[in-house]
Each structure stands twice: as structure tokens, then as C-alpha cells.
Amino acid sequence: MSLKNVLENWSDYRKTHEQGGHHEYEHMWTLAIDLNKCTGCNACSVACYAENNLATVGKEKLHKGQGMHWLRMERYWDEPQMGGDDAEYHERGASFLPMMCQHCNAATCEPVCPVAATYHTPDGLNAQVYNRCIGSRYCSNNCPYRLRYFNFYSYYDTSWPEPLNQQLNPDISVRDKGVMEKCTFCVQRIRTGKDQAASEGRELRDGDVVTACAQSCPTQAIVFGDMLDEESEAAKLWAKQQVELGPYEQKKDKEGSELRGYRVLEALNTDPCVMYLDRVREA
Amino acid sequence: MFVSNNFLSEGCVKCVGKTAKRFVSMVFAALLGFGGLMFVGAAQAEVPNVVPPEGSYSGEDVPQPIEFPHDIHADVNEINCMYCHTYARRSKVSGIPPTSKCMGCHTVIATDKPRIKKLTEYWENKESPEWNKVHDLPDFVHFTHEKHIQRFVFKNEGMDVENVSEVCAFCHGDVKSMTVAKKMKPLTMGFCVRCHEANDGPSDCWKCHK
């Protein structure tokens, strides 16, 4: 598209995107997270640490913003002194939002990678190939959600001293210094589920693949599934909330709507694959 | 002049004799070569619907606790690879057989040989020999034996399971002719990708990289 064309058709261009370069997806893995059910217990985050060989960096580095939590629990307080409108914020407590890679179909991190280490798979996943990554950190700078984590140090010896290295998951590599990493929607579980289904000679069913966060959630606030499989629980939740992939605003934003489904920062037109259900409080 | 003529004619006779010999040897070589070609053709025909991967590598000898003779087992006695490496068809790894599997035969067969005596010693001490890994892929690679064996053997029309060693040889070399196994193929990304391209294997990065 020429520059002239872009300038003349800017509004159209801004609202459409290439769908990650794929015209036909095999799967479209999505999460649906009900914030009404989320208690902020951090079990998902701990499960993610265990499943994906995440390094524990220690208090000091965490304060510097070098934590490697692929799934972080964000806390929001509606303090009046901070501009919120909730006078009883102290009694109500914080509202929580588990934040992991949104696997955007028009991901901002993908086009800026100089070595194509991050790309979109036919499964609708935003992939990161660790041994291809050269650590330019462009992707992290371009991610509006700040969900990419960089290995500033080699954590192998400090994070898993003997005999803790025995707990490492062999299905995913241990990332070394100078490599960007992020949530993969537990791609090793997806891979295992697919292999299992193929060896049994059947199609992948809903429930074959469950991410570590969804599996560990005590209130089942996190639901993982394939959007293209209409019978899957996640797809039903998306349909129920009338949230669709593609548009940059949802029906929830329309006046008089009682729907709760939304995607974080979808006005940026990144087309994320994670739907959140808004937390409803008594007035 | 006469002498030189004589010399020339003599030389010619010698020459003719040489060329004749050379001709015979050439025919012989051609016949051999043709036979060889036929043999190669027959060997390839054993694995239908496959373009075998190309590439060679000469690995170092890997010392093993017992010098296991693959040639006696797989070649002389024609034991199927999957008799011992039983997980190859249903798992990521092909598996090293437990000592009990060795002892299944070797309580009666060749019990007087020094290697078998060593094996029996392991068995009686309830220990297993600590085999060293020969084909070690990097940690960032996901490889399943199951997918490859299923594609090339069990789901391959016209393929005889008896000839599974031909499929194993794609990546492991001609183990039939070795005693202790040795790395004979490069097992690099290029080696994998060229074969994937030739046989319509998946080309997505995340299929193999983890």
C-alpha cells in the first residue's frame, strides 16, 4: 500500500488489519476470564511459574521491573485521592486482573522483530522462537500490554540451584541471557494434546488442552478453548457476551448494554484473543 | 629405422594388449556398477513414498559400559529395531530396553561370552548399565519418534514393518553394520528442514522449537 493510499484511506486502514497474515486458521486459541469470579489468589501465576520454567529473579530485580512473571496479577484501587470514585475503596478491596500475553491477531510485536523470531502461527498464537531471538527488545517496546519479559541475566544457577533443577519442565526450554520470552498459551500442552488426538485418530476436542492457569484457577474464572470450535466452552462465552474477533469496539460499550465482555486496549486495534468479563459491583 | 619400427610395433602390441585388458576391466566395472545401482534401487524401494534425507556426518566413538553389538542383533539375527526400542512407535523417545529384556534371551543364549557375563553381573546386582547418549538433540527442539515412525512405517502404504531399520537409518545411519552406535547423520536444522520440505512435513517454527 503506497503512502498516498494510506493517507487517503486512513480511517479505513486504521480499522482493518491483516489478520496476522493467515487467511485460514486451524485453531484460534482464546481465553475468557471472568473478573467477577477472580479472587486475586495468584494460583494462576504460580502454576505458570511451575509449568513454564519461569525464573525467580528475587526482590531487588523485581522492583526494577525485571520480573519474569508471564502471568501477572494486576491490582486496581478506586481511591478517590487517585482520581477514583469509590469512597469505600478500603472496605471493598482491590479489583484484580490477571494479565498474560493477549496473543493479538494484529500483534504489534511481530512486524518489528528484525529476525522474525516472533510470528503468528496457524493456531492463532503469537509465537516466540527463543533460539532465533537476538534480544533487540523491539517487540517489548512495541507491546502496549507490557507482556514481554527480557532475560537480562542468566538465571539458571540462581533460580534453580541443585536439586531444584530437577523440577524443570522438559517440554519447554530454559531461556538464557539475552532472550525475550512471554506467555505461549502453554504451547507444549497444545502440542501434546494434538499429538495425543492424532495418535488416537480423532479431532481435537474441547478440554483436551487446558493451560496451566486455567487448570489451577480455584474459581474457574479462566477458561481456555478454541474459538473455531463452536461447541467449546470459551467460544460459547465469547458468543454469549457478543464479543467478536476483529472489531475494535464491542457491544458492551454501546449505551444501555448489560453485556460484560471486553478486550483490553482493543481500541488500539491489536485484536487480542483474551476476553475479560467486567467485574460488576453493587453501587 | 628398422629398430624403431620394430620397437613401435612391439609397443603397439603392448598397447593393444593393455587396451584390451582395460576394456575387459571396464565392462566388468560397468556390470558391477549396474549391479550396484540395481541394489541401491532395491534398497530404496523398501521404503515407499519417501524422499530420504541427505547429509552425512562422522561422529566420535561413544564409550559404553558394555560394547553392545548392534550388528549381531539387527543384522545377523534380524531382530526388529522395535523389539528392543519398543517406545519408538508410540512415544517421543524410542527408549532403551530394560535389563530384563536383555535377560529374556541371555539367560540361555551366549551365556559364556564376556559381554554377557558382564550383563549378568549387572542383572544379579539389580543395576542397569548406564548407557551414554549418542543422538542428543538440543534442549530447544521438540522431536517425537512416534510421528516419524507412524508416518514412514505404519501409515505408509506398501511399507513392510520388517524393514523398519531402513527408516531408522534415515537419521541414525546404518546401525545394522555397527557394533556400538555412532552418530552418522548431522541432525542439524538444515538436515531436518530439507527432509520436511521434500516429504511435505510441517514447516511451522513452533512445531519443532520449544
Image (cartoon, coloured by chain):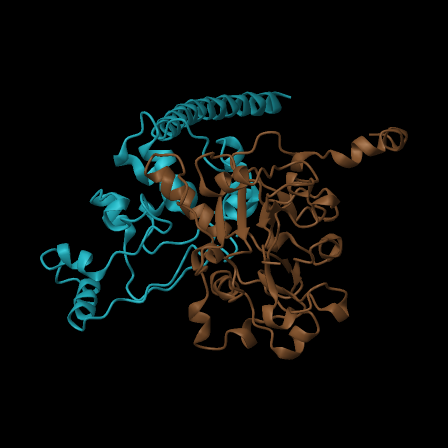
Q: Quadrant of the C terminus of chain A?
A: bottom right
Name the residue at 39% across, 27% down.
B32
Q: In the rendered view, tell whether residue A156 sits above or below residue B88.
A: below
Name the residue at 38% across, 45% down.
B145
Q: Residue furthest left?
A: B108
Task: Name the quadrant containing residue A241.
Answer: top right
Residue A190 position in % (x across, y down):
46, 47
Q: Residue furthest front?
A: A283
Left or right side of B7 for A225? left
Q: Which chain did the image draw in cyan?
A: B
Q: Is residue B184 visible?
A: no
Residue B60 position in % (x across, y down):
45, 58
Q: In the rendered view, tell whether residue A40 sits above or below residue B22.
A: below
| Camera-side residue of A112 and A210 | A210
| Camera-side residue of B138 and B181 | B138
Residue A194 position in % (x across, y down):
42, 42
Left or right side of A197 for B209? right
| Camera-side residue of A201 and A35 | A35
Task: Name the quadrant containing residue A208.
Answer: top left
| Camera-side residue of A25 and A272 | A272
Left or right side of B163 for A158? right
Q: Quadrant of the N terminus of chain A?
A: top right
Name the residue at 61% across, 37% down.
A244
Number of residue marks: 0
Chain A tint as drawn: brown
Residue A106 position in % (x across, y down):
68, 41
Name the residue at 48% across, 31% down.
B199
Q: Is residue A39 visible?
A: yes
Q: In the rendered view, tell whether residue A198 sits above or below residue B20.
A: below
